[in-house]
């Protein structure tokens, strides 16, 4: 019984606040800083996340075999073209160990035009961020701190989400 009470106390104090209007969005109670994060572009060039400080960054982790990823990707593509989010950098990062051909076909089949394909590096961002599944989206503020994440799928063009995100832009 003591264990359950202690567990409930720890969970209630460690789990971040969730915005009621936005499905699957979890706001961090404390900002998290990660150093030396890298991922790969479609030519296997290493991209360093810290080079985007000063921008609002959205890292979306996905895989071609993931049905919810397939469902949300078109709205993520539309989010990239939002005029009021011109400081937003979106990086859809494939963590499914798919090759470029398979990932490109996934984007082509869904009509994804505004996004580029990125891949998790051998260092594995998925592990550094402690992902428990896909899709998961990490939101990083202009100072390079994770301030929220979306665990599961979301409609990225949903009005409440876009307005909330614009407040961080």
Image (tube, rainbow, N blue to C red):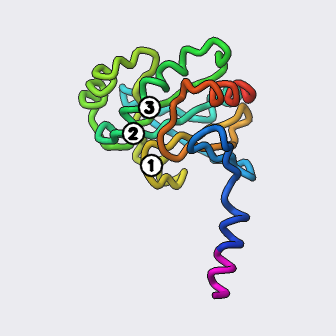
Relative to 98, does residue 117 appear above or below in the rendering?
Answer: above
Residue, x 71% and y 27% (percent of image)? 54
The kind of secondary structure element at disc 1 is loop
Distance from the alpha carbon under mark 2 to that under mark 3: 6 Å
Circles 2 and 3: CB distance less than 8 Å?
Answer: yes
Residue 84 position within the rendered picture, expressed as x and y whole percent measured from the top left: 67, 15
Q: Main secondary structure of the magenta part?
A: helix
Task: Point out the tag, 3 or 1, that comes first from the N-terminus.
Answer: 3
- The mark found on residue 68 in the picture is 2
Task: Point out the tag, 2 or 1, that comes first from the N-terminus.
Answer: 2
- The mark found on residue 124 in the picture is 1
Residue, x 47% and y 55% (percent of image)? 132
Give the residue pinned by disc 3.
Answer: 72
Distance from the alpha carbon under mark 2 to that under mark 1: 21 Å
Residue, x 33% and y 39% (percent of image)? 67
How many residues crowd mark 3 within 10 Å: few (<14), some (14–19), many (20+)? some
Residue 142 located within the stretch drawn in magenta: no
- The mark found on residue 49 in the picture is none
Residue 6 located within the stretch drawn in magenta: yes
Q: Quadrant of the N terminus?
A: bottom right
Residue 158 position within the rendered picture, expressed as x and y whole percent measured from the top left: 57, 27
The kind of secondary structure element at disc 3 is helix
Relative to 9, does residue 156 appear above or below in the rendering?
Answer: above
């Amino acid at each position: 019984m003591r264990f359950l009470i202690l567990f409930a106390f720890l969970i209630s104090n460690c789990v971040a606040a969730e915005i009621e209007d936005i499905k699957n969005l979890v706001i961090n109670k404390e900002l998290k800083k990660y150093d030396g994060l890298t991922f790969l572009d479609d030519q296997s060039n290493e991209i360093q996340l810290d080079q985007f400080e000063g921008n609002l960054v959205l890292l979306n982790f996905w895989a071609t075999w993931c049905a919810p990823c397939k469902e949300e990707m078109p709205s993520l593509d539309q989010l990239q073209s939002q005029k009021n989010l011109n400081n937003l950098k979106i990086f859809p990062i494939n963590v499914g160990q798919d090759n470029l051909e398979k990932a490109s076909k996934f984007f082509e089949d869904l009509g994804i035009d505004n996004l580029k394909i990125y891949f998790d590096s051998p260092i594995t961002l998925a592990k550094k961020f402690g992902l428990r599944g896909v899709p998961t989206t990490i939101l990083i503020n202009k100072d390079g701190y994770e301030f929220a994440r979306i665990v599961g799928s979301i409609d990225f063009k949903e009005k409440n989400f876009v307005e909330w995100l614009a407040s961080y832009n």
